[in-house]
Every structure is written in C-alpha cells, then in structure tokens.
Amino acid sequence: ELLLEVRGLSAVISESKKEVLRSVDLTVHQGEIHAIMGRNGSGKSTFSKVLAGHPQYEVTGGVVTFKGQNLLDMDPEERSHAGLFTSFQDPVEIPGISNYDFLLMAYNARQKKLNRPEIGPIEFFSVVDPKLAMLKMEKGFLDGHVNGASGGQKKRSEILQLAVLGADLCILDEIDSGLDVDALQDVAKAINGLLTPDNSILMITHYRRLLDYIKPAYVHIMEDGRIIKTGDASLAKQLEEGGFKAVSAT
Ligand code: ADP
Ligand code: MG
Ligand code: MG
C-alpha cells in the first residue's frame, strides 16, 4: 500500500528565498526501508524538515500525499499525529523538562488525538519500561533532561520516543552520527525491532556503515536539492567504493 508520495517538491529558505529543494520525487510503500545518501549540504536534512513542516522553509511547488492525505496542508503537529515521525539531525532542545515528562506529554497528546484515554504518570511506566529494556537504556535516563543529553543519548532518546509513540513513516536523519559501533548496533537493533509489515523507514545518512545494520531496499542519492539516482542496496556499495563521484549526475 502506498504510504508517501512526493512529486516535484520544491522549496526555498523562507528568509532568503534561496532554493534548497528542486523538484524532488519519492515514493514509499508500507513496509519498505529507504535510504537517502548524499554529500554534506546536498539537501537531505532540508528534505526531512520540509516533510515535517518546518517553518524555516517555504514550499514553492509539488505535491506530497501521506496516507492519502495532502501532507502540505497539515501543520507540523497534525503531520506527527497522522503517523509521520521525523528525527532531526540537531534535535530541538526543550528546556527544563525531563525525558519522562516529555514522553508522557507526547504520548497523551497522541492518545487525545486518537480519542483514547490519557494515561497517568505511574501507569505510563509500564509503557516505557519494555522500550527502555529493548534499547538497553538505564531507567535513570528518564529523569534526565531533554536538553542535557550527549549526542549519543539524544539519538537514543529519539528512538525511545519513536518506540513509545509508534509511527507509520519514520524519517531518521543521521541517526548514526556520534555513535560508537556498540551504540550503533543497539540503536539499529531497536529500529529493526520496531519494523512491522505496515510501517516504513526513510534513513538519511552520510555513511554506509548504518546500512550494514538496517538494510534498505531502495537507496536514493541526493545532490544539489534533487534526487539524482535511485537504486537498490548496491548503489550504496558503489558509493562506498567510488565515492559520490561514482554515482553523481555530472
Ligand atoms: P545535508 O543534510 O545534505 O547536509 P542540508 O539540507 O542541511 O544538507 O543543507 C542543504 C543546503 O541548504 C546547504 O547549502 C545549507 O547550507 C542550505 N540550508 C538549508 N537550510 C538552511 C537554512 N535554514 N539557512 C541557511 N541555509 C540553509
Ligand atoms: Mg549536513
Ligand atoms: Mg543533514
């Protein structure tokens, strides 16, 4: 079943009107794992932020359909409630709130949206605890503050958020950055554990090593705000051997 369809998506930076996405096309079906790779500055994070509805960008053309709905018509919160999860390469910092309270808030916002009963802080532990165990995270992590975490902890915190909230499409931006091999394996294992036949992952990564642990069926190469090539996992292999030159349009 079709999940996300992006056709001719173009966008500019709101402030400067600099064009950052140039007619991007992408189709994701349920259950598929996709990877977007590309040089630094090619527009990968921008693409993810535009799909999330980040106000820094203005869409100037194209159509995006998510689960049959016009995604571009929704505000960022509606997109998230509709089942789109985006992790940011540099996550927004929320001052003064513990990881636990943040998760509970996000969880209850979702419950409310789905007309389900909200859950209390004590009961919520039974939702979070198994996810923590899966991620091999210590319980003390929940007491920490969202903005006090190190890079690796932030990544885990995002995955924990994803595990607790669930999503139909998870866009993971450089989820591998700043993680050592052990941490990367744990996070990859957790992500693989979250995969069902119904949900999909779009991984954005600069490096191939993540793809050793989470195997995409489709690899897209982004360059200068465009997807210039789409292939299977062998495209990532080609990239590793020949660099971005080997898969470049020019
Ligand atoms: P990638 O994630 O592939 O490294 P980005 O999407 O972060 O690339 O950036 C793509 C290009 O757009 C870069 O040249 C970057 O400097 C520029 N860019 C993106 N967002 C902004 C912004 N908010 N302000 C200024 N420049 C931006
Ligand atoms: Mg970058
Ligand atoms: Mg980026």
Image (cartoon, rainbow, N blue to C red):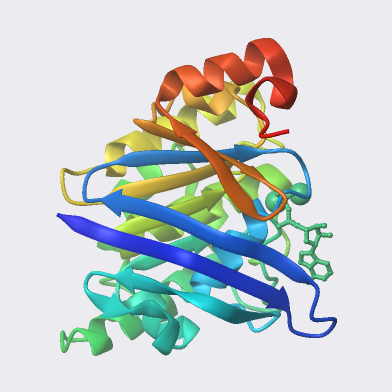
Classify 83 as above or below 14.
above
* Residue situated in front as seen by the camera: 200 or 44: 44
* Residue situated in front as seen by the camera: 245 or 74: 245
Q: Is residue 59 left or right of residue 65?
A: right
The residue drawn where x is 77% and y is 43% is: 40
Quadrant placement of the N terminus: bottom left
Quadrant placement of the C terminus: top right
Q: Quadrant location of ligand 1?
A: bottom right
Q: Looking at the picture, how far across and down is residue 117, in whole percent?
A: 17, 86
Q: Looking at the picture, how far across and down is residue 103, in whole percent?
A: 44, 70
The residue drawn where x is 41% and y is 63% is: 6
The residue drawn where x is 63% and y is 47% is: 153
Numbered disc total: 0
* Residue situated in front as seen by the camera: 235 or 7: 7
The residue drawn where x is 74% and y is 84% is: 14
Classify 66 as above or below 238.
below
